[in-house]
Image (tube, rainbow, N blue to C red):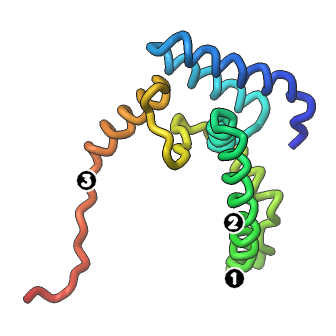
Amino acid sequence: MELAVHQDKILNSIEKFKADEKTRASDAAGTRQEIGKLCELTGVNNKAFAMIRQLDKASEERRDDILRSFDALRDIMEASWAGQRTPDMLDGDEPEEAGEAEAETADAAPEADEVEIEGETAEGDPELAAEAEEFEAQADQVVTPIDFGGARA
């Protein structure tokens, strides 16, 4: 993915979004829509962009600590993920290359949720608060019955 072409747009948009969040608490939906358009234009995954926004809000020390841990965990997980790939026995296809899987992820429809960094709350962040409230409302509507089908005593 060639992001250098859009580097100025990305950096300027992040600064604009930060300013918008401070000045207009009631229009979080407008910002989410702009973020969706930017992600669609650049091909950046919405979740990844949300993580970058959260990291941008964090202090330099905290950001460095998060990225240090993330890089170490990513190395472990990439090795695990690569080991889990097996060819499809019916098609005879080879396992997906890492680049193809990442491209599919980047092409996925943008999601509206944000990533919460430990210790940070929705207080003082109207957009995050609105999204958390919307998530809670949806979560309250989901009912998942569990029936393990085992013997009853």
CA–CA distance in space, label 3 to label 1: 36 Å
What residue sits 27% from the left and 59% below the top?
A: 144
| SS type, badge 2 | helix
Q: Which quarter of the image is occupied by the N terminus? A: top right
Mark 3 neighbour density, 10 Å: few (under 14) some (14–19) many (20 or more) = few
Mark 1 neighbour density, 10 Å: few (under 14) some (14–19) many (20 or more) = few
- Quadrant of the rendered image containing residue 138: top left
Q: Position of residue 54 (x, y in %)?
A: 62, 38
Q: Position of residue 70 (x, y in %)?
A: 69, 58
Q: Is residue 90 above or below residue 145?
A: below
What residue sits 50% from the left and 20% below the top?
A: 28
Residue identified by numbered label 1: 89
Q: In the image shown, does 147 or 137 lie closer to the viewer?
A: 137
Please identify the residue farthest to the front as the structure is shown. Answer: 61
Disc nearest the viewer among 3 and 1: 3
| SS type, badge 1 | loop
Amino acid under label 1?
A: Met
CA–CA distance in space, label 2 to label 1: 31 Å
Please identify the residue farthest to the top as the structure is shown. Answer: 23
What residue sits 67% from the left and 52% below the top?
A: 66
Residue identified by numbered label 3: 143
Picture disc at residue 73: 2
Disc nearest the viewer among 2 and 1: 2
